Amino acid sequence: MPSIDHDDFDLACEIVQDATNFAVEARRDLSPDAIVQKSDGSVVTAVDVALQVMILTRLEEVFGAIPVIAEEDLQSLAGKPAAQAHCRALLRDWGMDASEANITRALSSGGLDGSTAAVESAWVLDPIDGTQGFVDGDHWCPCLALLSRGEVVFACNGHPTVLGGMLLSAAKGAGAFWFPLAGGEFTVAEVSQAALAADAPVRLVAPARATESQIRARMSVGLATGHPCTLVHSDSQAKYAHVIAGLADVAYSRRGNGPGKYIWDHAGAILLARESGAWVGDTDGGDIDLSLGRRLSGSHAVICAARGLGPSIARVLAQRDLEEGVHAEGRGIARSTP
Ligand SMILES: [Mg+2]
C-alpha cells in the first residue's frame, strides 16, 4: 500500500476546494429528478454521487490506491436513470471521466468496514454532509478525513455557508486553518478559551429542522450550564464549524440507543476542532474511538465545545443518557441494528 506524504495534504485540500466550488455551482441548477430518496429514507442527489466519484478519482491520481470509507455507493442512485444521467453530465462538466467503468470503480471503492486500527491509511469521505441542507439552501459541507491506524491525522472540510465560504483544514499537531473558497490568504482557526461571563448566553447548535421536543431538550442542556441559552441552527459537520468559527459555543451529536453515528459525519470535525483548541470528547470526557469502522459504535456522543464548557456539557449528557435508559453496556459493542 502506498504511504502518504504529508507534504501532499495541500493537494487533498485543493481537491476538496474544487469539489465544494463545483457543488455550489451544481446547486444552482438542481432539477427535481436529481434529488432522490435512498432505501433508508434519507435524501441524496446526483451531486453527492458525482462529487464522490470526482474526489475519489482525483485522490487516487495523487495518492494511489488507499482504502476508503465513503457514504455513497452503487446503490445511492440505483434505479433512478434521470439522476444517474445528471451525475454523468456533472462529471463531464467538471472534466472527469464519466464512463460507466470509472463511475462503477469509484463507487465500489468506498466500502471499507471493520476495525481500521491496523490499517496504515484510510480516507473517510462524505461528499456532501447535510444533503437536506444542500437541497433546502441551508448548511452543508463536503468532508474528507484521513485515518492512520484508526486515528484521524488530516481533515479538510468545505464550508460554503460559513464565514462567507471557507475551506477548513488541519493536520494533526499542526493547527487548523481557514482558506477562502474563492482563494486568498489563510487565517488560523482558533477557538476562544475565555470563560463566558455569568450572564452571557451559551450558544448551542440545534438541527435546522428541530422539533419542539428537540428544541426543549437543547435548551435544557444549555441552561444546565448555569447560563442563559440561545440556539444556533445547523446540521452536518457545519455545526462543529460554527463552534470553530466562534458562531456557537457548543455542538453535539448523541448516539442514544442507535448503532453509533457514521464516522464520516464526525471524523474530520474532531481533528479540526481539536487543532483549533476546542474541547472534543464523549459523555465520560474520554476520547472518541474512530478505529471501529463505519460507525462510532464505542461512543455515546461527540461533544465539541469552546470556552471550557465541554466537561459540564458532558456531565449533562451523561445524566440524560442515564435518565433515558441509554444502554451503558452498548459502549464498545457494535450493534447489529442499522
Ligand atoms: Mg452525505
Image (cartoon, grey):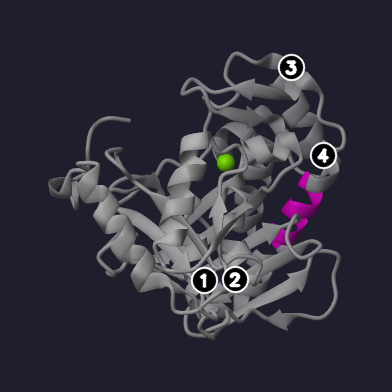
The numbered mark, 2 or 1, whose residue comes first in the sequence reads 2
In the image, residue 101 lies in the stretch drawn in magenta: no
The numbered mark, 4 or 3, whose residue comes first in the sequence reads 4
Ligand 1 under 8 Å from disc 3 Cβ: no
Residue on which the image places disc 4: 26
Q: Position of residue 219 (x, y in %)?
A: 49, 52
The numbered mark, 3 or 2, whose residue comes first in the sequence reads 3
Q: Residue at x 79, y 61 (%)?
A: 165
Q: Marks 3 and 1: which is nearer the front?
A: 1
The residue lying toward the viewer, choosing from 34 and 100, is: 34
Camera sees residue 62: no
Q: Distance from label 2 to label 1 (Cα)?
A: 6 Å
Residue on which the image places disc 2: 244
Q: Residue at x 41, y 62 (%)?
A: 303
Helix, strand or loop under label 3 = helix
Checking the image for residue 82, the label placed there is 3
User: Relative to residue 176, is residue 216 drawn left or right?
Assistant: left
Q: Residue furthest left?
A: 329
Helix, strand or loop under label 4 = helix
Q: Quadrant of the N terminus?
A: bottom left
